[in-house]
C-alpha cells in the first residue's frame, strides 16, 4: 500500500530528478540571430573568412563558429587542444578583450542527443566556438593512421560508416553529423550562415585545377549545404574560397587596418600551431616546415597569400 508520506517522498525524488536533468542539459546557445560560421579546421576562419569574422564579432555580438575537425594533421597527443587554445586567444584579441585565461568558458553542451565541446568568451558569452573534434585528414581526403585512417571525405562518400572524434568520446555517422548541423541551425537561428567552398573539388584530382581545395574544407561545406537545402532553412548563406584564393589578386589591402587585425589574430593563433609561420616576414619568405615535409600542405605553404585575400564563392 502506498501511504501519503511515500507519495510525498516519491514526489520529492521526482522533483530532484527533474532539476538534475535540467542542470545536465545545458542550453547550448546564449543568443540567436547573428551569424554561424562552419569551418573544417580551427585555423580556417582566420585565413579564409576574415576580415568578415572580425567585423561580425563587432557588429552582431552573436557569433558561433562550428569547427568540424581537430586540425591536428594526424599528430595526436594534445596538439589539437593547443590549436583550440590558439583559436580562442585569437577570438579574444578580435573581440578586443584582454587575453587572460581563455580556457575558462569551456563546457560540454547538448546538441540534440549528442554532447559536444563548447567554449565561449568569458566576458562576451555570445561569442562561441563549438568543436566537433572529428579526425583531421590529408588534403586529398585520405585519413591519418593516427586516427585509424578515418576522414570526413571517406564518411561523405560512404567508404566508412562512422568517424571517431580525436578525444575518443564519440563516433559520428553521416546521419549523426547532419543531425548535429541541423540542430545547431534550428536552435541557433542565425541570420547569416558562412561556410567554406562547397563547389570546390578536392586536391586528390587534377593538381592544377583552379578550384582545388583541402578535402576537409570541401566536405564540411558540402555537408552544411546539404543540411540547409534538406531542412529548407532560411538564412543568408555565404561560401568562402579556400586554398585556391591564392591564385586571385590580393583584395585585403596590406595598408588597411583590417589587414593588420587579420594578421594579428592569425599570429596569436600561430603561436600555438608549430606548423605555421610566426611572422609576416617568415610567412612571406616561403617558410615551410622542411623537417616534416609530408605535413606541409597548402594551408601552411600559402599563409601570406591567404592573409591578403578573402573571396566569396558565387
Ligand atoms: C600539452 O602537453 C604538454 C606536455 O605535457 C604541456 O606542456 C602543454 O601545456 C599541453 N598543452 C595543452 C594545450 O594542454
Ligand atoms: C591505415 O592505412 C595504412 C596505410 O594504408 C595501413 O597500413 C593501416 O593498417 C591502416 N590502419 C587502419 C586502422 O585501417
Ligand atoms: C592600398 O591602400 C593604399 C592607401 O590607401 C593605396 O595607396 C593603394 O593604392 C592600395 N592598394 C591597392 C592594391 O588597392
Image (cartoon, helix red, strand yellow):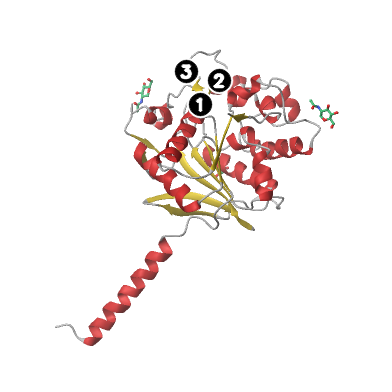
According to the image, label 1 marks what residue? 199
Identify which residue, 137 or 77, lies in the foreground.
137
Name the spot of residue 237 as percent of width and height, x first: 54, 39
Q: Residue at x 69, y 30 (%)?
A: 307
N-term-proximal mark, 3 vs 2: 3
Q: Residues within 10 Å of mark 2 (few under 14, many from 20)?
A: some
Query: Which residue, given by chain and number where applicable, does mark 3 sit on?
Result: 204
Dots 3, 1 in contact, CB < 8 A: no
Tell me the residue that label 2 is attached to: 211
Q: Residue furthest bottom?
A: 4
Quadrant containing ligand 2 reads top left
SS for callout 1: loop
Quarter the C terminus occupies: top right
Q: How far is disc 2 from disc 1 in space, using C-alphas?
A: 8 Å
User: Can you see residue 61?
Assistant: yes
Between the residue at mark 3 and the residue at mark 1, the CA separation in whole angstroms equals 15 Å
Q: Is residue 44 left or right of residue 55?
A: left
Front tag of 3 and 2: 2
Report if the beta carbon of the residue with label 1 is closer than 8 angstroms to ligand 3. Answer: no
Amino acid at each position: 500500500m502506498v501511504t501519503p508520506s511515500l507519495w510525498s517522498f516519491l514526489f520529492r525524488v521526482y522533483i530532484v530528478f527533474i532539476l538534475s536533468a535540467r542542470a545536465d542539459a545545458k542550453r547550448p546557445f546564449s543568443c540567436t540571430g547573428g551569424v554561424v560560421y562552419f569551418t573544417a579546421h580551427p585555423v580556417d576562419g582566420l585565413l579564409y573568412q576574415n576580415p568578415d569574422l572580425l567585423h561580425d564579432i563587432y557588429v552582431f555580438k552573436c557569433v558561433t563558429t562550428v569547427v568540424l575537425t581537430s586540425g591536428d594533421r594526424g599528430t595526436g597527443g594534445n596538439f589539437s587542444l593547443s590549436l583550440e587554445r590558439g583559436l580562442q586567444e585569437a577570438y579574444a584579441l578580435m573581440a578586443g578583450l584582454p587575453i587572460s585565461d581563455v580556457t575558462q568558458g569551456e563546457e560540454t553542451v547538448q546538441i540534440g542527443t549528442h554532447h559536444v565541446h563548447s567554449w565561449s568568451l568569458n566576458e562576451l558569452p555570445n561569442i562561441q566556438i563549438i568543436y566537433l573534434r572529428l579526425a583531421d585528414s590529408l588534403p586529398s581526403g585520405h585519413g591519418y593512421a593516427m586516427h585509424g585512417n578515418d576522414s570526413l571525405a571517406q564518411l561523405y562518400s560512404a567508404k566508412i560508416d562512422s568517424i571517431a572524434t580525436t578525444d575518443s568520446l564519440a563516433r559520428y555517422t553521416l546521419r549523426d553529423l547532419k543531425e548535429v548541423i541541423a540542430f545547431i541551425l534550428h536552435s541557433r537561428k542565425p541570420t547569416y550562415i558562412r561556410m567554406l567552398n562547397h563547389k570546390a573539388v578536392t586536391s586528390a584530382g587534377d593538381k592544377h585545377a583552379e578550384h582545388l581545395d583541402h578535402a576537409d574544407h570541401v566536405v564540411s561545406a558540402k555537408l552544411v549545404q546539404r543540411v540547409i537545402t534538406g531542412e529548407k532553412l532560411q538564412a543568408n548563406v555565404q561560401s568562402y574560397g579556400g586554398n585556391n584564393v591564392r591564385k586571385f589578386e590580393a583584395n585585403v589591402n596590406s595598408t588597411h587596418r583590417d589587414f593588420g587585425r587579420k594578421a594579428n589574430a592569425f599570429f596569436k593563433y600561430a603561436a600555438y600551431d608549430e606548423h605555421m609561420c610566426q611572422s609576416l616576414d617568415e610567412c612571406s619568405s616561403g617558410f615551410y616546415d622542411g623537417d616534416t615535409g609530408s605535413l606541409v600542405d597548402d594551408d601552411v605553404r600559402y599563409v601570406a597569400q591567404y592573409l591578403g585575400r578573402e573571396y566569396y564563392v558565387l
